[in-house]
Image (cartoon, rainbow, N blue to C red):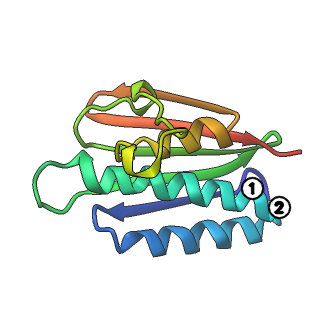
Amino acid sequence: MSNPQLSIVLTNNISELKKLSAAIDDFGAQLELPPAVIFKFNLVMDELVTNVISYAYPHDEQHEFSLRLWQEDGWLRAELRDQGLPFNPLEFPPPDTKAALEDRVIGGLGVHFLKEMMDIYAYQRDGVWNCLTFGKKLS
C-alpha cells in the first residue's frame, strides 16, 4: 500500500467530532501507528476542527470542510481545508498556561497543541480556502 490516506468531509456540527476521532483511530490502526502518535493527531484535530465548527462560519448555515491524513516518506501528514472566514491560526497568540485556571482566556489550546505536538505546520489562504497543513515525523 503506497502512501495510504484518509480523506473525510465534515460539516460544521460538533457531533462530527466522534466521526473524526473514529476515522483517525481506524486509520492509525490500519497503518499500525504508535498509540502516542494517534493520540496526538486526535487531540490536535479535535481542537482545530472544534475551532472551525465554532468560528469559521458566522451564520448558522451548514457548511462542509475537509480533512486529509496521509503517511509519506516517514511522516504522518494532515491537511485541514475550510471555506470559512480568513484566519491564520498560527498568528494566534499562545495561551498563558502558567496563569491560574480562573484567570486564563478561553481559546488558543488547539494552536498550542499543534505547535507542541507536531514537528511541522504551515498555513496559507488559497483563494477562498483556509489551508492548514501539519505533520509528525514517525520514528
Q: Quadrant of the N terminus?
A: bottom right
Q: Position of residue 65 (x, y in %)?
A: 34, 53
At 81% from the left and 39% from the top, the residue drawn is: 73
Q: Position of residue 82 (x, y in %)?
A: 33, 45
Which of 116/34 is in front? Answer: 116
What amino acid does circle 1 point to? Val
Mark 2 crowdedness (10 Å alpha carbons): few <14, some 14-19, many ≥20? few
**Residue indicated by mark 2:** 34
**Residue indicated by mark 1:** 37
Q: Secondary structure at mark 2?
A: loop
Is residue 32 positioned above or below 97 on the image?
Answer: below
Q: Position of residue 84 (x, y in %)?
A: 24, 43
Which of 17/29 is in front? Answer: 17
Is residue 70 positioned above or below 22 on the image?
Answer: above
Question: CB of mark 1 within 8 Å of CB of mark 2?
Answer: yes
At 61% from the left and 65% from the top, the residue drawn is: 24
Location of residue 60 (image quadrant): bottom left
Compared across the picture, whether 21 is left or right of 12 comes to right
Q: Position of residue 139 (x, y in %)?
A: 89, 45
Q: Secondary structure at mark 1?
A: helix
